[in-house]
Image (tube, grey):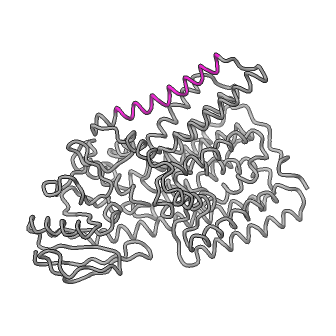
Amino acid sequence: MTAVASVEVPAPAPVSRASRPARVLLALLGLLFAYGALSLLDNPKGTLGTDTGGKLATVVTMDHRGTFDPNIGYWAERYDPTGRLHPLFYTSHIGDRWVNVTTLPMVVAARPLYALGGARAVLLLPMLGAVFAALAARALARRIGGGDGWWAFWVVGLASPLTVYALDFWEHAPGVALALWGGVFMYDVLDGRAGWRAALASGVLFGAAATMRTEALVYAAVLGGVAAVVLVHRTVVRRSQTWGRNLQWGIAYAVGIAAALVANQMLEQALVGGAMRAERAAGTAGMAGGGASLRAREAVTTALGLNRFEFRTDWVFGALIVALVAYAAVKFAATDRRDQRLGMIAVGAAAVLYGLRFANGLGFVPGVLSASPLAAAGLAVGWSVRRWRGVGAVALLAVPVVWVFQFTGGANPQWGGRYLLITGTLLVVGAAVVLPTLPRAARVALVALAVVVTASGVVWLSQRSHAVASAMQTIPRDDGSVLVSREAHLLREGGAFYSPDARWLTATTDGDLRRAATIASDVHAPALRVVGIAGETFPATIGGWTRGSRERVEFLPGLDVVVVTYTGG
């Protein structure tokens, strides 16, 4: 039996060799077309998460006002100057602006697209992000394992969590694309194919990625550390490198990162009058280490979680699935026919466990490994390829740091560990490099499992987007009444339907609800409509308002809300 550590892959082809441009262009257009076709399953006004809703609300307002100013306004500012009851949770009051966006370049780029084709047109940005992330994966695979790299392109593009993020107006796919291309340029530097210009480009790309996803800074730091170790070894041990060149490359890399961050801060100062991204990063850093028990729990969730069972049962199921897929990949990499059969049995067992997960309905699969079988396979067999090991080291060394700094409280409602998408994608590349060496049946089994899991995420997004959009077409009324949400993120989820003039408020406490009722009276609203999760108790009276009719509405698949209308005032 051949050990996994001795799996052979083709020698790396010279990167300078021209690839057929027509074939590359057709592949890019083909993947983009596939995303476009899949997006037709969704309602673009329904989203994968509340952050997307905040961005859509900003783009809608920018288009309505014909400006690039991200100010979403606040209709009740006169009565609530601090914005405690602002309908869109996480809205910041910066100067005279109300801002509910953390990634300014994304909404600025989306504004002209929205003017052309509405909410569906802005999906071009995440789609292009995923397309170029897949292209970067191909570039890495060619450098690591030789060949044409198309396995990496297609499995990253259509059989990984990036497929799901390509279909939602979130910045994850563009952020991953920028970081992966930053890794490609640094790989060329360390491989002796490029010099300080590539190091500078790598830094700029990572800095740009950080304007989209703060965790990109973690990967930039880890990559810089791994690169430093490699270069010092070459300088001291192999004497094939000079200290002067090391310093030149390091300075270029750091300058590139800083230049991109400064450019983004200048954009924020120009359009908002404040440093949004820097403050968000500082706030994230300030929370590091807090709530160690919760962080450990969410670390397990974002690694292995299935979001279906009680916590301990959930992670055990997730760990078993990941172990089965990893075991199958190891057995497939062997040459013994008995090992091949064992691998098939393991894939079948993993498929059964996934079936149990989805038996009672779809939903988020938050684990980076449980949502991406190919990432689990790459974690097991990627190390068999020597030239991938540095990439794998960066992918894994960043994980505990991301866990320490990631926002807490939202581990379950996400797909594929969204803070760890760079790690997951690099692990998929590790699997893609080995896939061509596996028997055909093994390749089909692993890729088919990954496609099925990814497809469940695509279908879940479709169900979720239609449910949210339908609910937001039902819950608000254009009759002058004041709509108050008892849930923090409910109205932000429906940000595509937001208007600065819409009489919406969010009141999560009883005191806030009374303040909202007072505002409704002050503006002489004909009714006060309060929405909360089904099963919640609604008071008989709120100030001078008296409880009346109620309506039950499905807001998300499996989650209903109740809208209670109060009259009197």
Q: Is residue 347 visible?
A: yes
Position of the C terminus by quadrant: bottom left
Quarter-wise, where is residue 466 in the image? bottom left
Residue 157 belongs to the span the image colors magenta: no
Q: Work out whether 436 lies above or below 473.
A: above
257 vs 218, nearest the viewer: 218
Which residues fall within the magenta stretch?
Answer: 244-266
Residue at coordinates 21% horizontally, 83% vertically from top-left?
549
Q: Position of residue 192 (x, y in %)?
A: 70, 25
Residue at coordinates 59% horizontally, 52% vertically from top-left?
157
Q: Work out whether 563 lies above or below 440.
A: below
Q: Is residue 31 visible?
A: no
Residue 249 belongs to the span the image colors magenta: yes
Residue at coordinates 66% horizontally, 40% vertically from top-left?
140
Q: Position of residue 554 (x, y in %)?
A: 37, 76
Chief secondary structure of the magenta portion: helix
Quarter-wise, where is residue 450 in the image? bottom right
Residue at coordinates 19% horizontally, 83% vertically from top-left?
548
Q: Position of residue 435 (x, y in %)?
A: 75, 52
Position of the N terminus by quadrant: bottom right
Q: Position of residue 335 (x, y in %)?
A: 88, 56
Drawn side of residue 355 relative to residue 487, left or right: right
400 vs 417, nearest the viewer: 400
39 vs 430, nearest the viewer: 430
